[in-house]
Amino acid sequence: MKIKSTRLKRKAPHLTITCDLPIFKPFITLLANVIERHPKVFSITLNYSNVDYTAETGGYRPVEIRIERKQDNRWYICYVTEFTYIATPFGQESTYAIDFDFSRGLGYQLGMTPEPIAAYSPLYSLWQRNFCRYHSHDVYQCKTSIEEA
């Protein structure tokens, strides 16, 4: 599968962020802003949460994004996972609602079997637009975890 690459020229001409699906420019900008704050690290994991999100009322679902710098100095999106609550016999549990696992080349939606990531292109495009819109309205708090090179 050919890797799609988008280069962010305005802020950091040396910065390239890639994954196996097209990347929405506002999403690149969002990730680039984080990378620029941590220029010497190997990986960054971003955990976005909304304090108002509950199993009872719903809201903006938590999201985890992991990016890694490879030997060619390019950044790769390893995965993007959105979580949701589901009812179990033991109460409410958090689980994957949507998972774009670029490192394994698979996409997943709750209640479905994993499929090749290419099948998730339309959903990934929609997800990126929505996430960037929510992010621009400051609905998320973000916890950043880094791994040194």
Image (cartoon, rainbow, N blue to C red):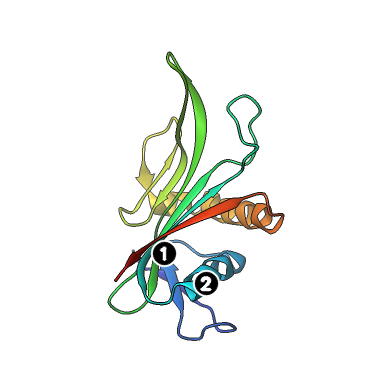
Name the residue: 61% across, 66% down.
26
Q: Position of residue 124 (x, y in %)?
A: 52, 53
Name the residue: 43% across, 77% down.
39
Look at the numbered discs 1 and 2 and tell me whether their residues touch, using CB distance below 8 Å: no
Residue nearer the viewer, 88 or 111: 88
Name the residue: 57% across, 66% down.
30
Q: Residue furthest top?
A: 89
Q: Which mark is residue 19?
A: 1
Residue hosting label 2: 32
SS for tag 1? Answer: strand
SS for tag 2? Answer: helix
Estimate how packed mark 1 is, as few (under 14), some (14 to 19) or many (20 or more) residues with alpha carbons within 10 Å: many
Q: Which mark is residue 34?
A: none
Residue nearer the viewer, 29 or 123: 29
Q: Amino acid at mark 2?
A: Ala
Q: Position of residue 127 (x, y in %)?
A: 57, 51
Estimate how packed mark 2 is, as few (under 14), some (14 to 19) or many (20 or more) residues with alpha carbons within 10 Å: some
Can residue 10 be seen at all in this image of the molecule?
yes
In the depicted structure, whether residue 48 falls above or below residue 23:
above
Q: Position of residue 144 (x, y in %)?
A: 47, 58
Q: Position of residue 105 (x, y in %)?
A: 33, 54
Quadrant, the N terminus: bottom left
Name the residue: 59% across, 84% down.
10
In the depicted structure, whether residue 55 falls above or below residue 50:
above
Quadrant of the image occupied by residue 129: bottom right
Q: Nearer the viewer, mark 1 or mark 2?
A: 2
Among the two numbered marks 1 and 2 on one chain, the one whose residue lies closer to the N terminus = 1
Quadrant, the C terminus: bottom left
Q: Amino acid at mark 1?
A: Cys
Can residue 68 be seen at all in this image of the molecule?
no
Q: CA distance from mark 1 to mark 2?
A: 14 Å
